Image: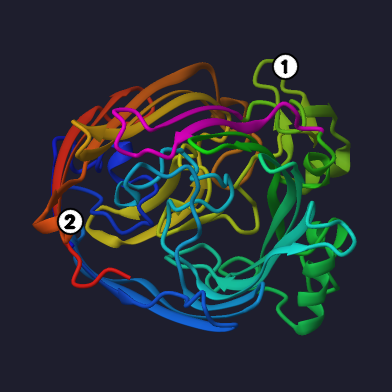
């Protein structure tokens, strides 16, 4: 693939939909991208299957020329067990009529691990849907267990990420499937410039697996609560499939701690309705509507009068009322999704969010040295958003994708160094509208694709801007 892009709002960057859910490889300003993919697929006719894949690129934008590894992996499968080694794209749901155009969803169906950032190196063991004995195939279990390394210039260098996921699938007749499960992530280990080398022994790995508190070498907060930064999502999904169309309803619930896991943050969630027709040549074959709300976060900040010892300690949850001068201590609520005091770079890779792309990244960098930045998590995890995605085929020949997102952004409960500050929350939300349109024009019997696209941002949370891109994709051999 060869891509060229022009944007009116450099040096601030491309409009939102020009880079969102593109696995972190698109130019961040006017520039270009060359990408070469190669690999194999699983052979479904064999009991033991294997595959490999690689995707290597060269990107040019405001930050100069940079080679990148998009994917590099090898996989093996035996019955319903799969092992993936290396860097591989996370799976995305709610795809366009042509998968080359990407997903119609803001999160790609996963609010914690979307396709918004670079793929993480590591391993993953996946249990694909497995029939639970004595249920006649009506109940299935699936899950994932893996460990990965964080990427990019981060406040804590060399941080590790553990993932455990488990889902239960129930089939009602031949048309209805119900899914429920938990996808849990832990950020741990690494080297902090303030705290030094963080706990990383095998005993510490066992602690993060079980959600246990840290040992004597952990910081006080991790000794009181649990080692590392734990967060994840709880998924509730219902699907109806028939011969010509399918309907999906999904409630993707983020959580940041135990209070979120026991639904104290309700009604927070990323809610999706998707209608998809099997005939992709229709003018409209796929429709997605999403409503996002992250305003609860286990409740507003609960506070009490601070003690003399707490005032003297300078704890980061201290708050001094600017009018009365009274000190308060923040004791609950305000989960502050995807931010953490110890792991100050949050859930990012090269400043792009792993999860919800509408959590805009916060980072610092030196103007004269574009590579000297450090991610600071996100500055707007309090938001409400409406999103519509449409896809189909123009004149029954040209697949397209249209995405439109409107959000109200209220900021965060805590600042970049995780100190409570009432000024970081916007009483009047910053309004933002972002849209993008792309099409896939088949040439040479589909082996060659021309993909033109336009993008537009208007609002207060991001810089106003317009961008256009064009890419050419050639497939030497289709699997």
The image shows residue 13 at horizontal and vertical percentages of 25, 43
Q: Residue at x 68, y 73 (%)?
A: 198
The magenta segment = 264-293
The image shows residue 459 at horizontal and vertical percentages of 33, 21
- The residue nearer to you, when weighing 21 against 144, is 144
The image shows residue 197 at horizontal and vertical percentages of 64, 77
Q: Is residue 278 visible?
A: yes
User: Residue 254 appears in which quarter of the rendering?
Assistant: top right
User: Residue 300 appears in which quarter of the rendering?
Assistant: top right
Residue identified by numbered label 1: 324
Verify whether residue 268 appears in magenta.
yes
Q: Residue at x 43, y 51 (%)?
A: 116
Direction from residue 233 to residue 388 in the image, left or right? left
Disc sitting over residue 446 in the figure = 2
Direction from residue 52 to residue 60 in the image, left or right? left
Q: CA distance from mark 2 to mark 1?
A: 69 Å
Q: Residue at x 47, y 78 (%)?
A: 43
Which element type, helix, strand or loop, lies under badge 1?
loop
In the rendered image, which quarter contains the C terminus?
bottom left
Q: Residue at x 64, y 52 (%)?
A: 341
Disc sitting over residue 102 in the figure = none
Direction from residue 129 to residue 7 in the image, left or right? left
User: How many residues crowd around disc 1 within 10 Å: few (fewer than 14), some, or many (20 or more)?
Assistant: few
Q: Is tag 2's residue or tag 1's residue first in the polypeptide sequence?
A: 1
User: How many residues crowd around disc 2 within 10 Å: few (fewer than 14), some, or many (20 or more)?
Assistant: few
């Amino acid at each position: 693939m060869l891509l060229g892009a022009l944007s009116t709002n450099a040096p601030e960057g491309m409009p939102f939909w020009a880079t969102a859910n593109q696995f972190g490889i698109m130019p961040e300003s006017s520039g270009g991208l060359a990408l070469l993919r190669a690999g194999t697929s699983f052979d479904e006719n064999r009991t033991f299957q294997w595959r490999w894949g690689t995707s290597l690129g060269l990107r040019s934008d405001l930050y100069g020329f940079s080679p990148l590894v998009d994917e590099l992996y090898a996989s093996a499968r035996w019955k319903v067990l799969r092992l993936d080694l290396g860097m591989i794209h996370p799976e995305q749901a709610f795809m366009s009529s042509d998968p080359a155009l990407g997903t119609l969803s803001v999160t790609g169906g996963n609010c914690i691990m979307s396709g918004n950032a670079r793929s993480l190196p590591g391993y993953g063991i996946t249990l694909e849907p497995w029939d639970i004995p004595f249920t006649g195939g009506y109940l299935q279990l699936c899950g994932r267990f893996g460990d990965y390394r964080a990427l990019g210039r981060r406040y804590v260098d060399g941080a590790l990420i553990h993932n455990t996921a488990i889902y239960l699938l129930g089939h009602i007749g031949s048309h209805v499937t119900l899914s429920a499960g938990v996808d849990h992530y832990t950020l741990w280990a690494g080297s902090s410039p303030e705290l030094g080398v963080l706990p990383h022994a095998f005993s510490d790995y066992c602690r993060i697996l079980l959600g246990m508190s840290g040992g004597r070498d952990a910081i006080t907060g991790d000794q009181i609560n649990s080692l590392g930064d734990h967060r994840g999502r709880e998924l509730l999904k219902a699907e109806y499939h028939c011969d010509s169309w399918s309907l999906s309803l999904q409630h993707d619930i983020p959580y940041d701690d135990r209070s979120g896991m026991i639904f104290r943050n309700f009604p927070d969630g990323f809610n999706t309705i998707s209608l998809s027709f099997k005939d992709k040549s229709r003018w409209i074959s796929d429709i997605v509507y999403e409503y996002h709300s992250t305003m609860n976060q286990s409740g507003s900040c609960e506070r009490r009068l601070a003690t003399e010892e707490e005032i003297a300690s300078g704890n980061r949850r201290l708050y001094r009322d600017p009018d009365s001068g009274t000190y308060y201590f923040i004791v609950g609520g305000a989960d502050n999704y995807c931010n953490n005091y110890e792991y100050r770079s949050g859930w990012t890779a090269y400043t792009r969010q792993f999860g919800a792309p509408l959590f805009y990244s916060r980072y610092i960098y030196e103007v004269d040295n574009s590579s000297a930045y450090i991610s600071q998590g996100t500055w707007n995890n309090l938001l409400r958003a409406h999103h519509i995605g449409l896809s189909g085929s123009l004149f029954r020949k040209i697949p397209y994708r249209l995405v439109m997102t409107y959000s109200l952004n209220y900021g965060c409960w805590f600042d970049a160094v995780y100190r409570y500050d009432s000024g970081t929350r916007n009483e009047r939300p910053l309004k933002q509208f972002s849209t993008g349109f792309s099409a896939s024009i088949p040439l040479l019997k589909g082996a060659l694709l021309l993909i033109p696209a336009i993008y537009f941002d208007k609002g207060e949370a991001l810089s106003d801007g317009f961008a256009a891109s064009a890419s050419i994709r050639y497939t030497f051999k289709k699997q």
